[in-house]
Image: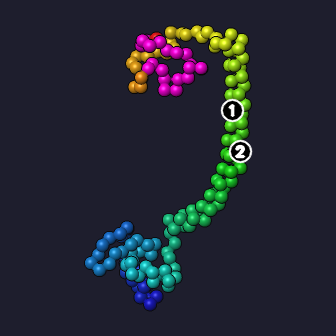
Amino acid sequence: MASILRSTIARAPRATIGLRASSNSVHTFTPAGCVPMYAQKAIKEADLPVRETAWSRERDAMRDHAPEASELWRKVTYYVALPCVIVAGIWTYKKETEHAAHIEHEIEANGGSPPERVVYEYMLRRTKPFPWSGNQSLFHNDKTNIRASEEFGA
């Protein structure tokens, strides 16, 4: 049977790529050429030598390299990226806690109200209203942001 398969492969056209319908079967592209689907399984079982090409060598190299690369990036994620995110989170929490304590100190030193802020002409410019009601940004916070006047151009 192997000799019949070899002769089928030798006679098969090499330029066919992808799937095409013929009168009696469907052919697919393989490294050995265009082979009918019913013969594909028999070819795999017969363990025929496959013609080695640059494409097949590159594919095999990628297949061999993939587990090593995957393991490398898993280690980078767990042993480098995750600790960096944790350290950055701790550092940010510490800085924000200091900042909140400073703001509270300024409010206490000013008699219970935040200190007066200087509003420059380039701040809070509006040419049209926001899509939501009001003249404040979506992330406005009355404790930390200056309140814009209700008319535009303020």
Circle 1 SS class: helix
Q: Is residue 140 left or right of residue 151?
A: right
**Split into 4 quadrants, where in the image is the N terminus?**
bottom left
Q: Is residue 140 left or right of residue 36?
A: right
Residue at 40%, 71% in the rendered image? 29
Residue at 62%, 62% in the rendered image? 67
Q: Is residue 93 magenta?
A: no
Give the residue type that dot 1 points to: Thr
Q: 141 or 28, which lies in front?
A: 141
Could you say which quadrant of the image residue 89 lies in?
A: top right
Circle 2 SS class: helix
* Residue at which label 2 appears: 83
> Mark on residue 92?
1
Q: Is residue 120 left or right of residue 84?
A: left
Q: Point out residue 17 in the picture as x, y percentages from the top left corner.
A: 37, 68
First along the sequence among labels 1 and 2 = 2
Q: Which residues are magenta?
A: 134-153
Residue 85 vertical position relative to residue 152 in the rendered view, above or below:
below
Q: Point out residue 39 in the picture as x, y percentages from the top left corner.
A: 41, 82
Q: 37 or 105, which lies in front?
A: 105
